[in-house]
Amino acid sequence: MANSAGILISYLSQCTDETIIDFVFDLIREYIGNDDSKIRESVIIAFGSILQTIYSQRIKDIIAGALPTLLNLLTDKNIDVRSTVAWCLRKITQYHTDCLISLGNTKPDDLDLFIQNLLKNLNSNKRVVFQLVDCFNYIVVKTKEFFEEAHPGANLTTCILSKYYSEILKSLISIAFNKESYDTENNIALASLFTFNSLIDFSPLDCIDIIKEFFNLIVNGLDETFSKEFFQDEVEKKYNYQENLCAIINSYFIGDKIQLNADQCLYLYNVLDRIFNERKSVFLSGLLLSSKLVIYSYNNAPDIFKEIFPNFCQYLFTALSQIEEAAICSMALGIIADFIRLLYDPFEEYFKEMFSFIYKIGVVNLKFYFFYIS
């Protein structure tokens, strides 16, 4: 019933006047310390439900004062209260990260208390951790969005998470590779890898040296997906780790956050080759990463390029043959277009062979199109 009421309050906060906000905060002030955990949980749901209100400035004026109470409730003896508080904090980071940025400028000690509480509770119940991990994701993504909107074309030099970057990344890796973290209900392992990827992708300049320290750890983690001890023949679990780890490594290549040497390039490509062979198929993040390694070797390590290029072209054939997977076919076509522009001479003979695949994909898509419009 509390959840249903929360949904109703959320709708009301988007279509009524500010009275609903005052009403909810009157409830919070009166009942947040109630002995009944159900009542405590209900008022937190009410608070979280108005965070998406159209009266955002009114909410922003209140959030800073509400944070200490919410942080205290992260240690509530009732798990439902704790997980609901974590959900509420996630919504604050999702819709009001600018409040936290402002807090960093005006009350840095309060911001430090907020971040430290998030970190401290990453060893809590899975339901709590799942939400708190997402808090870090929203903070770094929203911070970059705000900066790019205000300073188009400029590089983000720092952010409110910069001083905590190393500790956050260590915590996320620890969660991701804990055997107890992977389950179907609250998969904090994959959530941690997703947030780790965001922290790499959107890292400010003052954190580049920090994220470089984790690169080899991620590459080794990808190699260790062949470990039967960790995965215990759980194929779907292994595939999910491989896809997420490849996505993270791809993020290192955005903006040249990492520079490989020839040996690292070959080692990483061989790991991908082994993964593709074992799976007998390719996947999006792996195909993208292997194409980047091919282009890198073409520009920096010609001998390695000659070694891996024919092999990679076979994986392009594989991707084109996975015609039922539109995203993979589309990526393969994009890579082929890039290769034609960037390295036509070594690619020409393979392109001629691929043309029949490309023609087939076009025919199938046209048939689908005409069937659809008819």
Image (cartoon, helix red, strand yellow):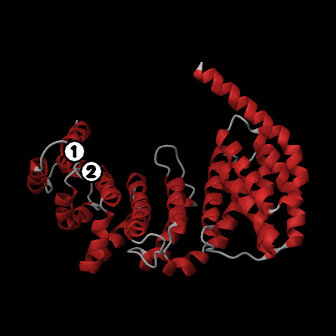
- Left or right of 363? Residue 89 is left
- Residue 132's disc is none
Secondary structure under tag 1 reads loop
When asked about the image quadrant of residue 338, the answer is bottom right
Q: Residue at x 39, y 65 (%)?
A: 149
Q: Which residue is mark 1?
A: 14
Q: Secondary structure at mark 2?
A: loop
Left or right of 347 in this view: 66:
left
The residue where tag 2 is placed is 52
Horizontal and vertical percent position of residue 189: 53, 55
Q: Earlier in the sequence, mark 2 or mark 1?
A: 1
Q: Position of residue 255 (x, y in %)?
A: 60, 71
Q: Residue at x 86, y 69 (%)?
A: 304
Q: Where 152 sits versus 16, above or below?
A: below
Please state which amino acid type lies under the numbered disc 1: Gln
Q: From the top left corner, tell me how far across and down residue 181 is, in percent.
A: 52, 54
Query: As rendered, which of 252 and 278 lies closer to the eye?
Result: 252
How far apart marks 2 and 1 lie (CA) works out to 7 Å
